[in-house]
Amino acid sequence: MAKGTDPKQSMVASNRRARHEYEILDTVEAGLVLTGSEVKSLREGHAVIRDGYAYFRDGEAWIENVTIPEYINGTWNNHAPKRKRKLLLHKLQIHKWSAKVAEQGLTVVPLSLYFSDGRAKLELGLARGKKDWDKRQTLRERQDRREAERAMKTRGRDW
């Protein structure tokens, strides 16, 4: 079943800009280590993952610059909105991706943040930055595909 159609999943935030800025080579689903007020804020649908990035240190995966605003009904022990958070990945995935990041100069960007079976999940993408001409070429391909679909649609009506 596709991600968007699963009734047990609810989207909190997505990073549409990442697919424009980067060429996504591989994706993985990771859990997040969160506090209670962060989960409550996410359940209300508040999060910004646009500026986030992940990195690997000491055999662990971390994410930074993901903003989860303070819970409105929180008390004095509310969380910091832009703290770094630990990602829950298998050791093999961490070693594999950290090697690719170190060798090939790739980066790890968050693509979407959602709840799956009541647990917060973050879809990460192993990405290579696009140059300006790559972005133009992608836009051109998309326009050509749309024009071809329109032409096929109108041609089918004439028969």
Image (cartoon, grey):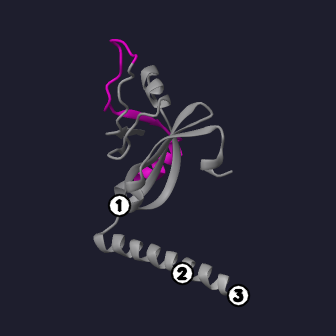
Residue 95 screen position, x and y as percent: 46, 48
Does residue 100 appear in this view?
no
Q: Quadrant of residue 74?
A: top left
Judge from the rendering whether residue 93 lies leftward or rightward of residue 9; answer left or right.
left
Taking the spot 52% from the left edge, 49% from the top edge, the residue there is 28
- The amino acid sitting under disc 3 is Trp
- Badge 2: few (under 14), some or many (20 or more) residues near its Cα, within 10 Å? few
Q: Quadrant of the C terminus?
A: bottom right
Of mark 2 and mark 3, the one earlier in the sequence is 2
Q: Are marks 1 and 2 in contact (CB under 8 Å)?
A: no
Taking the spot 36% from the left edge, 18% from the top edge, the residue there is 78
Of mark 1 and mark 3, the one earlier in the sequence is 1
The span shown in magenta is: 73-99
Q: Quadrant of residue 63?
A: top left
- Badge 1: few (under 14), some or many (20 or more) residues near its Cα, within 10 Å? some
| Residue at the far front in the pictured view | 158
Whether residue 39 is situated above or below residue 143 in the rendered picture: above
Please, what secondary structure does the residue beneath circle 2 have? Answer: helix
Which residue has dot 3 on it? 159
Does residue 144 appear in this view?
yes
Residue 122 screen position, x and y as percent: 48, 42
Residue 88 screen position, x and y as percent: 49, 36
Please identify, in this view, whether the residue under mark 2 or under mark 3 is nearer the observer.
Answer: 3
Of mark 1 and mark 2, the one earlier in the sequence is 1
- The amino acid sitting under disc 1 is Glu
Find out whether residue 91 is within the magenta segment: yes
Residues 132 and 58: in front is 132
Q: Tell me the number on the disc at residue 148.
A: 2
Which residue has dot 1 on it? 21
Residues 57 and 127: in front is 127
Judge from the rendering whether residue 131 lies leftward or rightward of residue 39; answer left or right.
left
Residues 55 and 50: in front is 50
